[in-house]
Image: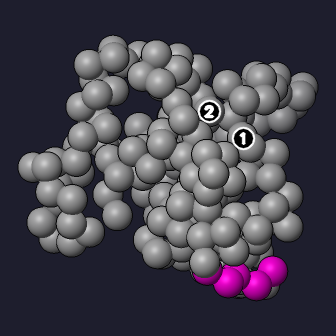
Amino acid sequence: MINNDRLIRLRYALDLKNEEMVEIFELGGMTVTKEEVGEMLTKPNDSYSDDLEEAEETVDDETVERFLNGLIIYKRGKQEPKPGQPERPALSGDEWINNVLLKKLRIALKLTSEDMLEVFDQAGVHVTKGQLSALLRKKGHKHYKDCGDKFARSFLKGLTVRYRG
């Protein structure tokens, strides 16, 4: 799954308008126009296959992370860092974007682990608490597991059922 697809599915699941997308990107520290958002929400070459070899990404991981950070602020408000607390580092190249997607959506939408398991169930995918915990772990933890595209796609599908259904 390419980043364009992640944004398209997330926009549909949460029923966001282009104006809201622009605002969310700005909250995440990125200035975009409605036209640029429209380009991001278009699959390259109008190819709607899930073949990663054919599709070219026009949205990078940093853009997705900025959107997710903006979504957290949009849904929950800006949280000021406590005195002496270091600022959170940006996404490093070795983090899997699907794991970051799950973690940040959990924060933005105030989802508990049980809520997340229900979202997966609504998409027709059974995930155990242990599997979910492994997906939400920090990279480098001994129980960390990369979140594959199937899980990310299923989670976004479950969000669509939950919020639009």
Which residue lies under the disc numbered 2? 71
Residue 28 in view, yes or no: no
Q: In the picture shown, does residue 113 fall above or below 90?
A: below
Q: Which residue is mark 1?
A: 108
Q: CA distance from mark 1 to mark 2?
A: 6 Å
Label ID, residue 165 = none
Q: Which image quarter: residue 156?
A: bottom right
At mark 2, the secondary structure is helix
Asked if residue 153 shows in the view, the reply is yes
Relative placement, left or right, of 149 versus 139 is left
Image quadrant for the N terminus? bottom left
Question: Does residue 41 lie above or below 153 as drawn?
Answer: above
Badge 1 vs badge 2, beta-carbon distance below 8 Å? yes
- How dense is the environment of label 1, judged by Cα within 10 Å: few (below 14), some, or many (20 and up)? some
**In this orientation, which residue lies closer to the viewer: 54 or 30?**
54
User: Which amino acid does the dot numbered 1 rest on?
Assistant: Ala
When the figure is inspected, residue 97 is found, relative to residue 146, above or below; the finding is: above
Q: Which residues are magenta?
A: 125-129
* Secondary structure mostly taken by the magenta-highlighted segment of the chain: loop
Q: Residues within 10 Å of mark 2 (few under 14, many from 20)?
A: many
Front in this rendered view, residue 56 or 118: 118
Disc 1, SS: helix
> Callout 2, which amino acid?
Leu
- Which residue appears at 32% of the width and 57% of the height? 2
Residue 106 at x, y = what percent?
73, 52
